[in-house]
Amino acid sequence: MIISIKIARMNRTRRLRAKEGIRRLVRENTLQTSDLIYPLFIEEGQGVEKEIESMPGIKRYSLDKLSVELDELCSLEISAVMLFGIPTSKDEIGSETWNDQGIIQKAIRYIKKHYPQIYIITDVCFCEYTSHGHCGIIHDNDVDNDATLKNLAKQVISHARAGADMVAPSGMMDGMIKTIREALDSEGFYQLPIMSYAVKYSSAFYGPFRDAADSAPTFGDRRTYQMDPANRREAFREASYDEQEGADILMVKPALSYLDIIRDLRNEFDQPIACYNVSGEYAMIKAAAAKGWIDGEKVMMESLLSMKRAGAELIITYFAKEVANLLNKK
Ligand code: PBG
C-alpha cells in the first residue's frame, strides 16, 4: 500500500540558501574595497613609526616613514584616506591648523606629489591642536561656537590650498557647513566637496582614538557640542541643517551602535551616507579576537557588512587594509 503523506505547501525560504551558487546570486549587500576610507595618523617629526597600544596594527607615522603605508594602500587598491595630524605645538586656539607649513598641509603635498592616485580627505577639527583638547575656542568653560567658525574657515582654506580633495569637519559646531562652503567658494574651491560629520554622538567609543591623536579634553567632555546617544529625531535635524547648508556627504559616527540612525538618514536624504567605524569598535574586536573569544576576521566582515546593510555607502575604518586583503584573496 502506498501511503502518500501530504505536506501542505509551505513557504520555504531555505531554497535560496541551499547552495553557495544561489546564495551569492540573491545576496542583497556586498562589501567592496571601493567602499573604504582608511584613517592615517601623521605626526610631526622624523623617524616616527609608533604602534598605538589600544589599536593593534595601527601606527602613527612621520612623513618620512609614510611611504610604506601608502605603498601598501596602493597595492591593496584602497584609494581614499582620511588624515589626522599630531602637531608638536598646541595652543589655546589651535592656530597650527591653518599654518600652511603645518603637518597636515605638508602631508597633503607629500601624498599628492608621490601618490597622485590617492584621494585625500582631511579631518577638520581643533582637538588635536588645542592645549585643552576641545574642538574650538574656549570661553567661559565651553566651546564658543561662532568664534570657532572663523578659525574653521581658515583651516579649510589652508587644507584646500595644500591640495586636499575633500574636507570633513568633525567639530559639531552649528553653522560649520555653511561657513566652510562659503569660505571654499569665495576662494574658488567650489569643486571641493564637504563630508559632514553631521550626526556625531558624544561617545565613549572614541577612547582609543584620543590616545592615538593626543586629543582627549583636559577638562569636561564634549557633551555641549556632540550629540546625546539617547536621541534619534535630533539626528534628522542635524542632518537636515547640514544638507541645507550644502554638505555633499552626510556621516554618522560611531557606526555599530548607531545603525538605526544610518538607516534613518539613508531613507530621508539623497546624499551619499558615510559612517565612521570608530576606534573603540575596532579595539573591541581586536581584543576579543586576541583572546580567542571570537573569530576576528568574521566578526570584522559581519560588522562592516551590517553598516552597508543599514545604508552606508562609505565606511571609514581602521580595518580597511585587512578587509581589502580578504576581498582580494577571494
Ligand atoms: C575629532 C575626531 C574624533 C574622532 C574623529 N575625529 C574624536 C573625538 O571627537 O573625540 C574619533 C575617531 C575614532 O574614535 O576612531 N577630531
Image (cartoon, helix red, strand yellow):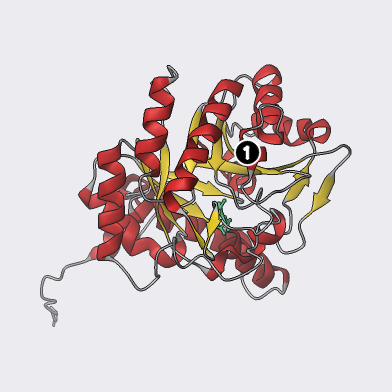
Quadrant of picture, ligand 1: bottom right
Instruction: Let me know if residue 161 appears in the view.
Output: yes
Q: Nearer the viewer, residue 139 or 61?
A: 139
Relative image position of residue 100 (x, y in whole percent): 66, 27
Q: Position of residue 23 (x, y in %)?
A: 36, 52
Residue 228 drawn at (x, y percent)? 39, 69
Q: Which residue sits at x=63%, y=38%?
A: 97
Q: Is residue 295 visible?
A: no
Residue 292 as seen in the image, left or right of residue 64: left
Residue 207 falls in image quadrant: bottom right
In this rendering, would 157 be left or right of 197?
Answer: right
Which residue: 53% across, 41% down?
Answer: 124
Quadrant of residue 3 within the rendered picture? bottom left
Q: Residue at x 66, y 34 (%)?
A: 104
Establish if 77 lies above or below 199: above
Give percent across and percent down for residue 305. 44, 54
Is residue 183 left or right of 137 when viewed as pictured? left
Quarter of the image containing the C terminus? top right
Q: Name the foreground residue: 138 vs 123.
A: 138
Q: Is residue 184 above or below residue 315?
A: above
**Amino acid of disc 1:** Thr
Name the residue rendered at 34%, 56% in the picture.
262
What is the quadrant of the N terminus in the image? bottom left
Q: Mark 1 — residue?
A: 97
